Image: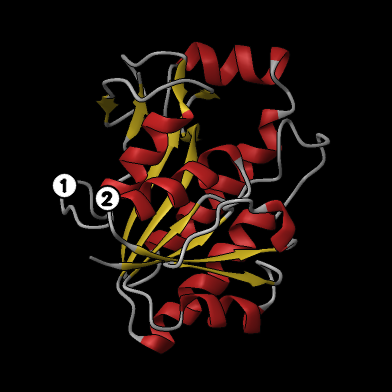
Amino acid sequence: MSKIAVFGATGLTGGLVVQQALARGHEVVALVRDPRRLTTKHPRLEVIGGSPIAASDVARCVRGADAVIHCLGIGGKGDGRPTTLVSESVQLVLDAMQRQGLTRIVCMSNVGAGGSGTWFANRVVIPLLLRWLVPIIEDKDRMESALRASPVEWISVRLPNIVEGPAKPVRVSADGRGIGLSISASSAAGFLLEQVSSSAYVHQAPSISN
């Protein structure tokens, strides 16, 4: 079993990553701004209060871990303004990982990052109908650039609309085409967790859906 550092553990998907990791016998260390928001309690769960963009807090969270799962997001649709939260946090995690000798990070990204998905979605639907997604995808692009520039084993999992619901079979696409419009948070969490020990998508950015 592994010790996994989780960022974004109070989000819908991140919370399920924590629960599923514990159910599979892993140890979990979660960095959250407000520990009271993480209602899961378990003897193998350590909750650290702190900021995902404070280097000392990030270093504390990843210390002694075998892998990192980064599920941080700005929450919902955000406010439409540019953001660097995710890319800034991931860069700090990468810096801490290299100092401490960690090798594996799994990040939550969006279909649309890196030009993934269909031309129609990227050039028409998102700019005109889902404009709130633009700054989120731009930040995920910066995050993926940081991952590619790092020497660690990274996997960036690009997700469509995340919905509540049970785990279902997952479709995987290298370029974001040919997949569905949504994925259940439980399915997404399970796939993220599987990448901790799998070499199938190392140094890749698969898009997934149900």
Find the residue positioned furthest to the bottom: 99
Question: Which numbered disc covers residue 103?
Answer: none
Task: From this view, report whether residue 141 is shown above or below residue 22.
Answer: above
- Residue 195: image tag: 2
Q: Which residue is mark 1?
A: 200
Above or below: residue 134 compared with residue 59: above
Taking the spot 73% from the left edge, 23% from the top edge, the residue there is: 131
Quarter the C terminus occupies: top left
Q: Amino acid at mark 1?
A: Ala
Estimate the x, y position of residue 75 in percent, counting from the top left: 71, 40
- Residue 46 in the figure: left or right of residue 167: right
Asked whether disc 1 touches disc 2, contact meaning CB atoms under 8 Å apart, the reply is: yes
* Left-right relation of 201 to 35: left
The spot of residue 109 in percent (x, y) is 49, 42
| Left or right of 19, for residue 86 | right
Mark 2 belongs to which amino acid?
A: Gln
Q: Mark 2: give few (<14), some (14-19) or many (20+) Cα within 10 Å.
A: many
Instruction: Between label 1 and label 2, give the one nearer the viewer.
Output: 2
Disc on the earlier residue, 1 or 2? 2
Instruction: Report the residue at 36% width, 53% height from top.
Output: 21
Residue at the spot x=47%, y=76% of the render?
62
Residue nearest the observer in this picture, 75 or 109: 75
Residue 91 position within the rendered picture, expressed as x and y whole percent measured from the top left: 54, 68
Inter-mark Cα distance, 1 to 2: 8 Å
Question: Going by the image, does 110 lie left or right of 168?
Answer: right
Q: Secondary structure at mark 1?
A: loop
Are there few (<14), some (14-19), or many (20+) residues within 10 Å of tag 1?
A: few
Q: Nearer the viewer, residue 200 or 26?
A: 26
Q: Nearer the viewer, residue 154 or 23?
A: 23
Circle 2 SS class: loop
